[in-house]
Amino acid sequence: MLLIDCPYCGPRPEVEFRCGGEAHIARPAQPADMDDKAWAEFLFIRSNPKGVHAERWIHQHGCQRWFNALRDTYTDAFIETYEMGTKPSRLPDGRTTR
Amino acid sequence: MRRFSFAALLAEAANAHQGWGRQWRNPEPKRSYDIVVVGAGGHGLATAYYLASVHGITNVAVLEKGWLGGGNTGRNTTIIRSNYLYDESAGIYEHAVKLWEGLSQELNYNVMFSQRGVMMLAHNQHDVQSLKRHIYANRLNGVDNEWLTPEQAKDFCPPLNISPDLRYPVIGAALQRRGGVARHDAVAWGYARAADARGVDIIQNCEVTGLRRGPNGAISGVETTRGFIGARRVGVVAAGHTSVIMSMADVRMPIESYPLQALVSEPVKPVFPCVVMSNAVHAYISQSDKGELVIGAGTDQYTSYSQQGGLHITTHTLDAILELFPQFSRMRMLRNWGGIVDVTPDRSPIIGKTPIEGLYVNCGWGTGGFKATPGSGHVFAHTLATGEPHKINAPFTLDRFYTGRLIDEAAAAAVAH
Ligand SMILES: Cc1cc2nc3c(=O)[nH]c(=O)nc-3n(C[C@H](O)[C@H](O)[C@H](O)COP(=O)(O)OP(=O)(O)OC[C@H]3O[C@@H](n4cnc5c(N)ncnc54)[C@H](O)[C@@H]3O)c2cc1C
Ligand SMILES: [Zn+2]
């Protein structure tokens, strides 16, 4: 079980959280203008890197607030958490931090 | 290849079993091949075998970054069944079950395929409706599946607790009698031996690190930790690592990789005659021929390549197992482990072309692809040999995520397998 550092409550066990998947996938502003390729990208295509990944979490059984996190998917170590609507201090380039 | 037979066994018995020898070569990679398969799991090895045996294409290499069968093939709980909901799925999984039925003979290798029956439990009205819908759909597709009352379920699987006092009582079950289990390692080894005997090079400790393309954009070979290896066609069969390999050619995939766990108990005498699965409480269990209870847990909630999942995921499954089979509460668990499974949005595999000429992919089997191993290899070999899909894998395109023609087995496979 992961120990996750909620930016609002501090380190808490993983079971208090839900993972919301890859971060920074913006809901289309003009859905009617989207073609099939754009819809597929939005709905289905994911980066799925082996290395640094940007993802969303919600502290469901705590403060109930969403936040973003950078996590290394090879070591499962959290690198940083940051507020919704902001960008991380480094790019999730998929390279492992190991 | 030295054939296994009763006579060979007798001869070796007299020889203190000193003469069996190695079952496949350990060749150096050639500079190029007609076809390179990336990943020596069951699916990759089966692909190579059918390329050689059905299509006569033997200038083939299977490249494996670790040891053959060391991925999900060697980590899964070996449940085999074909009672999927949609026609396309019934088509491919039933194709596989038919091949399983003759596989030990075909490969001259005992894969210990045992059709002991797979029983899926219903605990609520929704389960009943969904399982019955599956049964009717399966029958239309010629796939066996039948409804059992709780008493019939207990007759079939005496250890099952059907007491109405359970938190989630068993109110019925669907049984596929032709379903069962097979020995996972033997499947990899049997295909490896038979492919090797036909001239396929299986190259272990050879990680693919790049996909090279020619001036026309088509694939020309793969970069590996053992140098460049040329190929006219490349088939990527790398399960949880598919996104990583495809990203080497800038192809983005509709896949996420999650840890999936399993565990086994200490071995005991035969106590468990079949396979039991429950979607609602999330549990699946069988007993290996060695005597261990084989128990499958769920996936973690986050993507990972760490090959280990959270302990709370396994304990959750054990809670469910002990509700259904309280007599196992004193058993000790020997080992648990994880594999990285490649999950697609519609829980169906992707088998076919990619946007890059000469590059083909067979992936997205997620939590339940062991059962498909022979069928998957068979149709993917056809795809690699002819450049076009077999009619059985034609619906399982990468393109379906762009056209919207999904094969939505998510409900059917809400639990792994
Ligand atoms: C715990 C668990 C339980 C499961 N239970 C069941 C079940 O009961 N029934 C069922 O049907 N399915 C089950 N599955 C799913 C099943 O195991 C898989 O779908 C199936 O084995 C996939 O086979 P494969 O040959 O495609 O993959 P793998 O066996 O994983 O083979 C892929 C190979 O590719 C290699 N590879 C990766 N990257 C590279 C690279 N860059 N270069 C070279 N080689 C590379 C890997 O090392 C690996 O050996 C389970 C899976 C797990 C993890
Ligand atoms: Zn919080």
Image: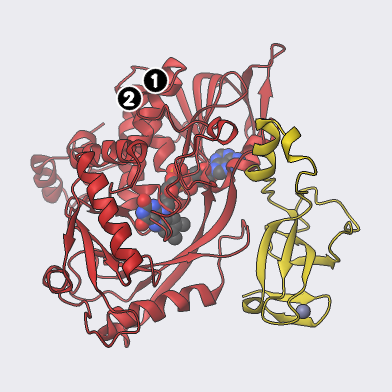
Q: Colour of chain B?
A: red
- In percent of width and height, residue B208 lies at 61, 36
Q: Quadrant of ligand 2?
A: bottom right
Which residue: 80% across, 48% down? A93
Tag 2's secondary structure?
Answer: loop
Label 1: which residue? B58
Which residue: 32% across, 88% down? B330
Disc 1 and disc 2 on one polypeptide chain: yes
Q: Is residue B75 visible?
A: no
A55 above or below B140?
Answer: below
- In percent of width and height, residue B173 lies at 23, 65
What's under tag 1, amino acid-wise? Answer: Thr
Q: Colour of chain A?
A: yellow
Which residue: 24% across, 66% down? B290
Q: Mark 1 or 2 closer to N-term?
A: 1
Are there few (<14), some (14-19), or many (20+) residues within 10 Å of tag 1?
Answer: many
**What is the distance, in whole Å, between disc 1 and disc 2 at their CAs?**
7 Å
What's under tag 2, amino acid-wise? Answer: Arg
* Rendered image quadrant of residue B213: top right
